[in-house]
Amino acid sequence: MRIRLPPLPRVPRRGSDRRRLEVGSRPGGGAPGSPYPSFDVAAEDKWAHDWDEKTRRLVLQRVHDVPPYRFFAPSEARLLEAICARLLPQDDRLPSERVPIAPWIDARLHEGRGDGYRYEDMPDDREAYRRGLAALDRTAVEVRHASFLELSDEQRDALLGEIAQGRVRVEAWEGLAVDRFVRRLMNDVISAYYAHPLAWAEIGFNGPSSPRGHMRLDLGRRDPWEAEESIPRSSVEIVRRAPGGSGGGDVPTH
């Protein structure tokens, strides 16, 4: 017996350029090295059938309602922005198309959101961030004889790598597990980045699928509206953000 499925809901048409401005995304996420250069999260078919009105509203809020700094002091916010820019470089994007990261970390801390637990050798996330940022900047002064903001990009990368790999011993880190702080920071950076439609388009992620959902769930299969890889690359190559695929220094992301 053949079952007749109800037609997909019709959604008012919007010009593709207008939608891209609304969603803040170009095909491939505006990243020249994307393996999915033609994948567009603002495509009319996706906009109309993958996302219901509530989902579209939430996506647009993520793009346009970037929270103001309410937890970090201005000096801490500038330092965190500089650190995020090296942990996950976006130099291959126009400044207006870069995913904001630090404001979402600030929002999490301001609202007191966390994992619901903490390690015995770590303070709560709020104190950990304040102490961690201060310790990192103090490390720059003691090891590189300049504040972190005064260092070149290459010096920042090298210093972050040394800290992540436990190769620096500075008194400012006493009482704070450096490896756990680095993992907490990297988790926040990655989570904020990949919650944005630009990142979805770059890696070919279909994003929320409500109400349409997915039918072809087997490995190596995809629905017609999902991204199709045009430039075969390994997952390691995909997440490298620096021009030329050199990555963002020696900081581990695992």
Image: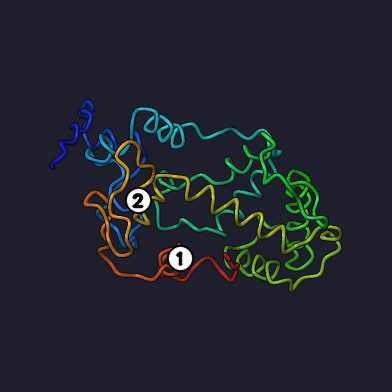
Q: Which mark is residue 201?
A: 2
Tell whether 226 sits left or right of 249. left
Q: Nearer the viewer, mark 2 or mark 1?
A: 2
Question: Residue 61: where, in percent of width, then height?
Answer: 45, 32
The residue positioned 43% from the left and 37% from the top of the image is: 63
Q: Which mark is residue 25?
A: none
Question: Residue 108: where, in percent of width, then height?
Answer: 63, 39
The residue positioned 79% from the left and 51% from the top of the image is: 131
Q: CA distance from mark 2 to mark 1?
A: 15 Å
**Residue lying furthest top:** 12
Residue 78 vertical position relative to residue 163 in the rendered view, above or below: above
| Kind of residue at badge 1 | Arg
According to the image, what is the colour scheme of the structure? rainbow
Residue 90 vertical position relative to residue 75 in the rendered view, above or below: below
Q: Which residue has dot 1 on it?
A: 240
The disc, 2 or 1, on the residue closer to the chain's N-terminal end is 2
- Helix, strand or loop at disc 2? helix
Tell whether 142 sits left or right of 222. right
Mark 2 touches mark 1? (CB < 8 Å) = no
Crowdedness near tag 1: few (<14), some (14–19) or many (≥20) residues, C-alpha within 10 Å: some
Residue 66 vertical position relative to residue 148 in the rendered view, above or below: above
| Kind of residue at badge 2 | Ala
State the image quarter where residue 119 is shown.
bottom right
